[in-house]
Amino acid sequence: MQHSKTIYLVGENDVTCQRLASLLEFMGEHPVLVAKHDLPALIENTPKPPLCLIIESGQSAGSLAASYPRVPVLLTAANGSLPAAVNIVGQIPPAVTYSELTQLLHYCQEYHRQRPMRCGGFGDTQQLELMRCLVGRSQGIEEVRTLISQVANTQANVLILGESGTGKEVTARSIHDISARREGPFVPVNCGAIPGDLLESELFGHEKGAFTGAISTRKGRFEMAQGGTLFLDEIGDMPMPMQVKLLRVLQERVFERVGGARPIEADVRIVAATHRKLDNMIKQGQFREDLYYRLNVFPVEVPALRERQEDIPLLITELQRRQYEELGLSLKFTDAAINSLCEHHWPGNVRELANLMERMSITHPDGVIDVHDLPVKYRHVEAPQFVAQYPEALNHAQDSIDSAPDKSFADRALADMEERDALHALFESDDSDAAMTVFPDEMLYDLSGPVNVALPVEGIDLRALLGELEVNLIEQALEQTEWVVARAADLLNMRRTTLVEKMRKYDLKREDA
């Protein structure tokens, strides 16, 4: 939030106001004495709000302060507590000292700096541009936006620090887009992707015949970026010999093409970025200390996504909007899926999130993503899984079999299908080698070892018996674990979702539920 250095002194005690005005002028500020009735017009017609209002304490001080929430207020000393207006940041004691007044003015500056961005105020165009590029409301990303706003219109070199995938190039582009050089080119160079022996020619260009293969004169990135911004990505991967040459250009602001002798002025703004710890590299002799201090005039550290997880829903919304604009896909996420993504560690940061969104748009185009639709490593919360029931499916199978020309063959096929389904339901688990022995109801079930059971002469209904046994074992497991489904699934050596599906199939519910 930008402000002017003007300080409005409002009050009826001219002696107090004059004394404070003299002290503020001595401190280099710009105090202005105003009458209370003139204050609304001054505030409304000023493009930047004043640094603060100094109001004489009294019964109307609170209501007057509340009328201007954009502006911090200091009250002259009075007995009693401060009024309730939130923009009253402190009191000026009668015998105020230089250090005390300096501290109070700092509070006023912080009130402007920390104020949430809103539409309709000064600098909204730049702030909205930053909000679009750097999505989020966390403290970390707010600080990045503040730093960008402060440095954009200067010529200072900027060093952007942060892990891979956090958005360092987006930050560099944001600095360029709201700077005075925004009409010039933004030229990125990945210092780690270009071989060291070619990097000098890539940056400074070369003359015809400068080396084998130089069949024509070629401009380098410095010339391409004239009047704009040169973004040196992964500066930590630049070879040491090239660091020396870059340092000279930063110091002298001139360079020469490879094989040339004519100096060329470097009218560029340098923004560098790296995911490496340059201070450690300096200690290890892998990065020049003098170059580091040339680049690190204004550091901006972009936080990792795991440090601003509250921004993940906003990032998902922004990525959804971009997918719709670019691909026409309207991907949606349930609340449970978003909560699960918020619990992820995100080692790949925002780039990993964008890749996941693209993957989901391929597997579920125009769909709604739930927890179970996410890749396994992104499932961090428990969520019920919907299992569709199709009671008409068996009827359709029966109808097709009844219409078969060979009825006896069709009967056998249906019986085989029913038996296969029953056996599959019973033995479905992660351990395909698990063995079970089935006994009639009146016998004791002992699954600890192999047991032989004689088949009755009259035969048995195997499918019904298997179903009863499955229900009985599931109920035992649930009772032993006090109906904790995950633990019961472990006892039965099956997936939790499989057990939930069987509980629905057999309508198994806790009696006291």
Image (spheres, rainbow, N blue to C red):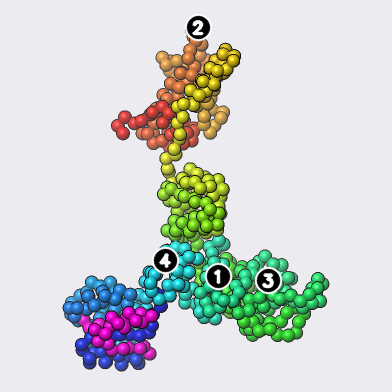
1 vs 2, front mark: 1
Query: Which region shows up in magenta?
Result: 28-57
1 vs 4, front mark: 1
Query: Residue at point 52% right, 15% down?
Result: 452
Residue ID for mark 3: 239
Residue ID for mark 2: 457
Q: Is residue 87 magenta?
A: no
317 to the left or right of 243: left
In this view, the residue in front, 179 or 422, is 179
Helix, strand or loop status at disc 4: helix
Q: Earlier in the sequence, mark 1 or mark 4?
A: 4
Q: Earlier in the sequence, mark 1 or mark 3?
A: 1
Q: Quadrant of the N terminus?
A: bottom left
Query: Residue at point 56% right, 48% down?
Result: 362
Query: Residue at point 44% right, 39% down?
Result: 385
Q: Amino acid at mark 4?
A: Gln
Q: CA distance from mark 1 to mark 4?
A: 21 Å
Seen from this angle, which residue lies furthest top?
457
Q: Amino acid at mark 1?
A: Arg
484 to the left or right of 193: left
Q: Amino acid at mark 2?
A: Val
Image spot of residue 140 (x, y percent): 45, 66
Residue ID for mark 4: 139
Q: CA distance from mark 1 to mark 3?
A: 25 Å
Label 4 neighbourhood size at 10 Å, few (<14), some (14-19), many (20+)? few
Residue ID for mark 1: 173
Q: Is residue 156 visible?
A: no
Helix, strand or loop status at disc 2: loop
Q: Is residue 42 magenta?
A: yes
Image spot of residue 163 (x, y percent): 55, 63
Count of marks overlaid on the render? 4
